[in-house]
Image (tube, rainbow, N blue to C red):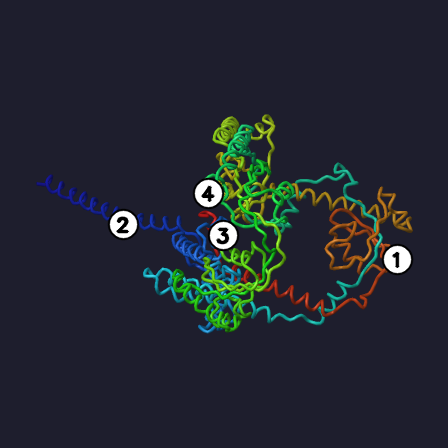
Amino acid sequence: MATLQTLRNKAGVLLAAIIGLSLLAFILGDFLNSGSGLLRKKQTEIAVINGKSISYQEFQVKMEKGIENYKQSSQTTNVDEQTYASIRNQIWNSYLNEFVYSDQYDALGLACSSDELFDMVQGKNIHPQIQQAQIFQNKATGGFDRNRVIQFLKSMDKDATGRQKQAWVSYEQELIKDRIYTKYQTLISKGIYVTRKQVDADFVETYKKYDINFVPIRYAITPDSLVKVTEAEVKKYYDANLSKFKQEASRDLAYVVWDIVPSQQDKDTVEHWIKAQKPEFERIENAAQYVAATSEVPFNEAYLGPKDFGENLRAWAMSADKGSVFGPYQEGLIWRLARITDIQNLPDSVKASHILILPANGNDFDAAQKTADSIKGLIDRGQDFATLAAKYGNDASKDKGGDLGWFTNEKMIPEFSKVCFFGKKGDLVTAKSRAGVHIIKIVDQAASSRKVQIAFLERTISAGDKTYQDIYTQASKFASSYDNGTKFEDGISKENLNKRIATNLHEGDAAITGLDNPRELVRWAFTAKKGDLSDLKEYGPRFVLAKLTEVREKGTAPMDQVRTQIENSIRNDKKAELLIAKANQELQSSSSLEALAPKFNSNVATAANSYFTSYTITGLGMEPNVSAAMTFTPVNTISKPIKGTSGVYVIQVTKVQEPGAEANRADCVSRLEQSYTSRAGYQVFAALEKNAKIVDKRTKFY
């Protein structure tokens, strides 16, 4: 019985233990799952601004909307890397605006009313972004067209998905933020005042001129071996000047490239191909169609004059018959055949007016044509063209009675130009283009001359598959043979390659000289360790292998990293002491600079019209101590030795010229106000951002 009870007691303890472990596992599991969620959140966190976390997913949604808005407004389907970066910065600034600046705006009562928004979108003060958007440009005149904005806004409700309207509302919100931002910046700049004392000082510092003679005693004349720098001095200097060694995170790279260039075989292949095309190109009846199917560039319908050709083509184009073929000829890496498809006597320029009728919903050209025909009928019956243009026109020219002024053939879209240049002075015609339907009045034409239409058959010399593979094999062999930092340096010497350097790269940089879109390489540099080699990558027309040669983290640079800089500073300080002591001694017996100069193997130089606010002095470079000394050194008095950046200097002011009649105090006021205003904007926002405790992780994702 006792044994059974003992078992029961032990079983109870065991059961309690099992339950306890189960509860612990449940709690820990929940905690770990929560931690996993937190970890995932941290992994996808792109920024923290004023304690507010922003996820990559949230940021990317805004990116996609921004890209869609850009494509729509610019009427393009292609977005290059530079545009992507610009959109990312705009979205980032919108977050700063929301989380950093908005409190300032609210405190000051800054806002943008609906009337202001209307004025920015379709009123008298159109926002620059809307003015520059391709979708709102008149295709015939190339200028901003307010009517296209109105037409676009009216068409939004016809989008059953609602996405167009949603995108536009988001765009308007950004315009509102931009307007409030501008108000804030203007408010700050208008609060800046330049005092009379500031103007007085600037007036003298800018316009008071000094002529000086000087003897430069360069630090280089004292051998480094005469000046000893100890470890204790380096440590003391470092500790006393920590603020000088503050740095942002940066990296240095050494890299080698293998250019993907065409081989002689590639060049011969293209040359043989273009030569083989010539008989067919001469024989074929429809050269334009042949170009469209065979050439790397499309057929251009434009009619060209002498100024449109280089020397190699001009004489032939201006004298050969229709159907004549020139070439093949080579320009750089391009081989061409040229065939004259038409010859016309056309005016060099035309003066015309037009009335543009926009198709309803952007596609009802039939209705637009009927409207244009009706208006043309009114003009034929004697009504005033300019009056009708002002009433019915749909582009900026309506404010000038439809007058487009003088223009050349290439300035207008082909459908419009064809009518103007092939018609006759006084013609009144209609023409349809992608912009709409035009009623065109040819007002005047310049003198006519020979113009030719030419079909160009083109082929560019580029690296073929075999060439590409050969260069890749060569680069891969190097990468595998010299597969660490030490071997990399040896390999460059053995293979006689050119080592390139990229220094002071920052985490957000997207450019390295000579490399196309090297963003991936920069991101690698901030995840690798010093001495690591990158993978072999292709950047534009070259393969690249890089070594991370230096790592600088944000904060205070370690002493060893700035040791050389410190040693040079200490060494120059000690040299300055020696040279100043020697110069003082020599000055006791030298009554002129001419007598002093030979003692230091130097000479007397002259700098005329020097002034305090100048960054440099002729013959000296940037020496602020000398610039300061010349302002209080009496005329014709030899100064004491002046410690400078590159040496010690002894100067003599030979002439002081007070501000003359040409000096303008108003210019000083204007310059100071402009300087303070431009600085105020970025300095205020920099201060706000600094206090906002921003953690920016964008470079980990882009």
Examine the rendering and report whether any part of residue 111 can be seen.
no
Amino acid under label 4?
Answer: Gln
Disc 4 target residue = 289
Indicate the amino acid at tag 3.
Thr
Around disc 4, counting alpha carbons within 10 Å, would you say few (fewer than 14), some (14 to 19), or many (20 or more)? some
Element carrying mark 2: helix
Eye-nearest disc, 4 or 1: 4
Query: Residue at image x 11%, y 39%?
Result: 3
Mark 3 — residue? 83
Asked if the residue under mark 3 is in contact with the one under mark 4, i.e. CB atoms within 8 Å, the reply is: no
Q: Residue at x 53, y 69 (%)?
A: 183
Which residue is disc 1 drawn over?
636
Crowding at dot 2, Cα within 10 Å, few <14 / some 14-19 / many 20+, comes out as: few
The mark that comes first in sequence, 2 or 1, is: 2
Dot placed on the residue nearer the N-terminal end, 4 or 3: 3
Image position of 628 (left or right of 347): right
Label 3 environment density (alpha carbons within 10 Å; few <14, some 14–19, many ≥20): few
Q: As rendered, which of 459 and 152 lies closer to the eye?
A: 459
Q: Nearer the viewer, residue 390 or 201?
A: 390
Which of 424/170 is in front? 424
Q: What residue sits 60% from the left and 71% below the top?
A: 191
C-alpha span from label 3 to label 1: 60 Å
State how far apart marks 2 and 4 are (Cα). Answer: 75 Å
Quote the CA–CA distance across marks 2 and 1.
88 Å
Above or below, 84 relative to 198 = above
Between disc 4 and disc 3, the foreground one is 4
Residue that numbered label 2 is attached to: 27
